Image (cartoon, grey):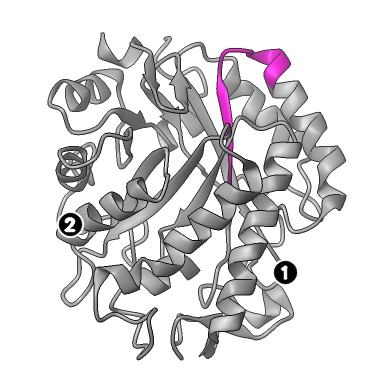
């Protein structure tokens, strides 16, 4: 079965094609993993099938927190000791699974109540949590450096790689989507190069921080699946740009539609996008979205829809998914 085939491409070395993608557990305390966090990921790590596990959203700064008090953080060195204990534990449980950490800035997709700071975005917008103002170019540079510093902490904490979150309506996705980006400068919506500029610069800053030997994935909200929003064609162009900038793995999901599609509830509902991207890039392509059974994952791989299949909710509920 293709789901059990290893994948060795560039910096990505996985024992299988099944991935447990980021899903919030709301178990962290003061930004650090707890015994509850460890127990959750341990249960999945005991499953011999997944080759990669990506931990949930971790903020790069207080301003970048989502509206969840129990989320992980890589915003300061104070989390390193707890994170090292966590990665050591998971690697003892399963030494063959790769463990990546996802890092993110929420932008306007949070609230001042959650962060204690003003909301910022690509443009002056509201996303439910209040009015956000547009970032200045110096502030964009600062956030890119915060991503880089957070990624270095991920490496120092013993993870096997890092994932930059640019999907689900968060800050980097707010720059990418024409639904939320109305800027007039080089980060504006006038071209795909402009809309991906902050993503590309963030990737380059992270690479400089972590060095040449550390894998970098990026979760791209490639299409908004809404009129006037980003498109599958945009996702293809963006993925090509990011591959040329040194990306190792592209993890495709929704943009302003978050992780669901109203028009498609078939297993792998983002597979039209992943198939299009896979044709144009050589880095591994990961797709998620409603995959419930190993047979569904196998079919998507056999059809060439992606290189890797993310199984989220099904494995979240049944950690030994695929072995029963």
Report the residue at 61% width, 40% height from top.
211
Q: Is residue 97 visible?
A: yes
Q: Residue 251: percent from the left, percent from the top?
A: 37, 43
For mark 2, give the secondary structure. Answer: helix
- Of 26 and 82, nearer the camera is 82
Q: Which residue is mark 1?
A: 62
Please state which of residues 75 and 40 is positioned toward the viewer in this rendering: 75
Residue at the disc numbered 2:
232
Q: Residues within 10 Å of mark 1 (few under 14, many from 20)?
A: some
Picture quarter with the C terminus: top left
Measuring from the top left, give residue 227's x and y in whole percent: 16, 75
Which quarter of the image is occupied by the N terminus?
Answer: top left
Observer-nearest of 187 and 32:
187
> 10 Å neighbourhood of mark 2: few (<14), some, or many (≥20)?
many
As drawn, is 154 to the left or to the right of 303? right
- The answer to whether residue 295 is left or right of residue 148 is left
Judge whether 48 appears above or below 105 on screen: above
Residue sitting at x 20%, y 41%: 271
Residue 82 horizontal/vertical position (percent): 83, 39
**Magenta-highlighted residues:** 91-102
Q: Residue at x 50, y 17 (%)?
A: 320
Q: Earlier in the sequence, mark 1 or mark 2?
A: 1
**Would residue 83 appear left or right of 265 to someone viewing this image?**
right
From this view, report whether residue 197 is shown above or below residue 307. below
Can residue 71 be seen in the rendering of this structure? no
The answer to whether marks 1 and 2 mark residues whose Cβ atoms lie closer than 8 Å is: no
């Amino acid at each position: 079965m293709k789901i059990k085939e290893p994948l060795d491409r560039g910096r990505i070395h996985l024992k299988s094609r099944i991935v447990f993608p980021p899903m919030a557990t709301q178990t962290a305390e003061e930004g650090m993993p707890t015994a509850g966090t460890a127990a959750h990921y341990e249960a999945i790590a005991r499953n011999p099938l997944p080759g990669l596990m990506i931990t949930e959203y971790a903020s790069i700064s207080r301003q970048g927190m989502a509206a969840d008090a129990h989320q992980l953080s890589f915003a300061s060195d104070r989390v390193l000791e707890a994170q090292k204990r966590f990665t050591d534990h998971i690697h003892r449980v399963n030494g063959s699974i790769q463990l990546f950490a996802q890092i993110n800035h929420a932008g306007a997709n949070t609230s001042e109540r959650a962060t204690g700071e003003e909301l910022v975005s690509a443009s002056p917008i509201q996303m439910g949590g209040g009015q956000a103002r547009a970032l200045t170019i110096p502030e964009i540079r600062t956030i890119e450096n915060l991503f880089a510093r957070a990624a270095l902490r991920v490496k120092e904490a013993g993870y096997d790689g890092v994932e930059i979150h640019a999907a689900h309506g968060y800050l980097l996705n707010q720059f990418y989507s024409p639904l939320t980006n109305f800027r007039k400068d080089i980060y504006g919506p006038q071209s795909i190069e402009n809309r991906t500029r902050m993503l590309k610069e963030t990737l380059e800053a992270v690479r400089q921080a972590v060095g040449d030997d550390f894998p970098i994935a990026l979760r791209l909200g490639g299409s908004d699946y809404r009129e006037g929003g980003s498109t599958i064609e945009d996702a293809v162009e963006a993925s090509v740009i990011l591959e040329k900038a040194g990306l190792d793995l592209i993890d495709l999901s929704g943009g302003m539609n978050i992780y669901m599609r109203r028009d498609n509830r078939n297993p792998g509902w983002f597979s039209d996008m992943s198939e299009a991207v896979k044709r144009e890039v050589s880095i591994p392509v990961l797709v998620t979205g409603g995959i419930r059974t190993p047979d569904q994952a196998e079919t998507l791989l056999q059809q060439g829809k992606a290189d890797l299949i993310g199984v989220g909710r099904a494995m979240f509920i049944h950690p030994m998914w695929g072995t029963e």
